[in-house]
Amino acid sequence: MKYQIFILATATMVLGACKPRNYNTSGGDGGALPLAWAVNSSGWTSADEQGFSDYVQKIGAARIAGNCRDAVECVSKIPPGNLAPETVPSLGVKIDCGRLPFLLRAYYAYRMKLPFAYQNITNPTLGGRYTPEGNSVTGFVDQARTSTVAAFFQSAVGSYFTAYYRVPPESDPNALGAFADTYPVSIGKFGVRPGTVYYDVGGHVAIVVKVNPDGSILTWNGHPDNTNSIRAFTEANFPNPPSSKRKLGGFLRFRAWKAVGNAADKKAVPDTTQEAYSLEQYDRKWASEGKTFYAWLQQRMGGNGKIDPVSTFSSTVAEICTKMTDRNMLVQKAIDAGLNHAAHPGLPRNIYQADGDWEQLASPSADLRTKMSLIEIYSLVQSSTAAVAAGDRSKYVFSGSAADLAKAFLSVWNQYKAKAECTVVAKDSNGAPMMIDLEMALKKAFTWSFDMYHCPELRWGLVGSERCDSDAQKIAIYESEARLRWNTNKDEQAVTGFDFGNNSGAPATDFVPILEQYLADNPPPPPPPPPPPVLTPVNLAEELLVFNAGGNTLQLSVRKERMYNASVPVSLTGKVTNSSSFQQMILREGNTFRANSYARVGTGAFTFFFDLKDFGNHSLQIFGKKSDGSEIQFGEIYLKSVQ
């Protein structure tokens, strides 16, 4: 029997309830509306879910191998099952992290003729991306049908974003989280497999494309600048474990849909029974077992909780090669657009969250991802060789000596240096070729200009090149952007002017001298432990702290209390003078924005609620955000869990 699907109109985030429009099946407002595709099934089955997982693994393998790069290109080239390829219509939007998993799920449903719909949400507090309580589902948008597949994808994919994954799971269909598009799964190879997504509560979403035999996981990530990358699931790439307080974030699967109704008006409804459904990832079992979330995850996925340093090194270097190729295309787009010859208009308010040409052609986010990969392999080389040299096998899997490990790292590094795909051919200001290889990336990545108004030589860190045609003003701007280039903490809320970021120079990335020391039988001393913070201790008894900054006084009361059944909940209740000039109070951990600790200033009073389990024993900085977007740091506290 053939069914017809109803296709939902554009989903939008609203601050209040959204009442769906009611369409008839004939006459009046609704008329006999056209349908985007016919449905050949009454609903998703376990076989369909396995087929979706196989499809994501296949398309992920093509992306990893470099057989496709752009997300829409990959979807167009790699069809589900044994179907023929079909070009995806132009979507008119960038495929960022929230849209990439949704595009794969929607496209699979279309090609396999399965029922499909998506939620409408409302946000109860401060904004979909960072709301501490999560978003709630108000319905499934207008039941208006689109006449073509192209119209559906342009509408649905264009309207989807990360707030749609920030919905807590609930069993009560009338409660917050009823019938969300995604649901949490058990941690293991059945629950976490290609097609499962991970929502990091910091606001990033990725889709799993491969689970390795050692339990390590590879993910596919879309980015706001329309690039995408393959990333290992590590703490550096996904710093926020699932939040236990409101059960936000973590590993999620897309909900299955059923087709119901009469033949003339077949609708998609959510299936309330989902395979692999589980809340276990919010129980923080890893903490009770004395593990990090990431070691616990790898063990649950079939590994032994230890890292194979050579394999991890190899996959990360391969990532860097892909990122260099993607960057070359992005830089060339700006050059082709003539922006290197255009007058420099100044920096946007935030270089990581901008619109227009800057969002499309500048590269601060893409460059930061490459730099973080370089820092990651430097840290891996440094820590793993030191551990092996000390006879510590608790974290790394390697049977030889530290010198053997150094040889293995260098062998992999030299193999990638010799690969053609790890050397990009850029164009200089005269259009002549410039060869940019891995060695240059290792040593010059923190000199790369992210600024699309600079000459190609500066874009690739070739400072002082006579070929560069940037004028003196642009050279001065490049020099002023040094702190921004050195910055390794992406903050999409701050004003990122020339004084933002790291003022202590570029982090170390060149690991080759470390390896050469081991090969010369002269190992370097182990890295020193980080210095202890000089902070204000707070032991969770009620305590009053007073901070002064910028002519404003902040009084802060810290209390331990019982909330949300959490074991170590804390409230920070404060009052700030000149409250009319402040829009929000913000907590950060280092430069990392803490999504579950965000409060508005009302009459001067405000309250943060959070669980120390989500922080550990960490330093927290307290900022006031003013109406003009600028921020004042009031002070820093150190919260230590005292049971």
Image (cartoon, helix red, strand yellow):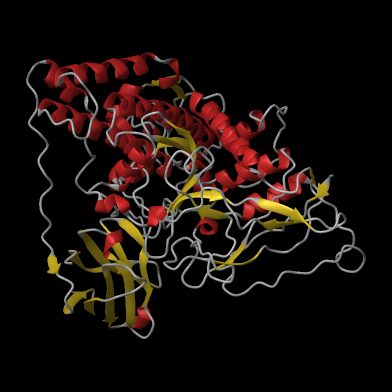
Q: Residue furthest bottom?
A: 603
Expressed as whole percent of the image width and height from the top left, the position of residue 406 reads: 20, 20
Asked which quadrant contains residue 621, the reply is: bottom left
Q: In the image, is 594 to the left or to the right of 83?
A: left
Q: Residue furthest right?
A: 27
Give 439 or 169, whichever is nearer the viewer: 169
Expressed as whole percent of the image width and height from the top left, the position of residue 457 reads: 39, 30
Q: In the image, is 94 to the left or to the right of 569?
A: right
Expressed as whole percent of the image width and height from the top left, the position of residue 386 reads: 14, 30
User: Does 158 sit above or below residue 567?
Assistant: above
Expressed as whole percent of the image width and height from the top left, the position of residue 634 reads: 23, 70
Q: In the image, is 592 to the left or to the right of 84?
A: left
Asked which quadrant contains residue 52, the reply is: top right
Residue 412 appears in view: yes
Residue 447 appears in view: no
Give 112 or 500, whichever is nearer the viewer: 112
User: Does 515 sit above or below residue 90?
Assistant: above
Please report the residue visible at 19 percent of the width from the left and 75 percent of the height from the top: 547
Please report the residue visible at 43 percent of the width from the left and 62 percent of the height from the top: 130
Give 136 or 3, whichever is nearer the viewer: 3
Give 325 or 115, whichever is nearer the viewer: 115
Q: In the image, is 443 to the left or to the right of 163?
A: left
Please report the residue visible at 31 percent of the width from the left and 15 percent of the height from the top: 414
Q: Quadrant of the N terminus?
A: top right
Q: Quadrant of the C terminus?
A: bottom left
Task: Please give the count of numbered marks on the rendered protein.
Answer: 0
User: Does 171 sit above or below residue 552?
Assistant: above
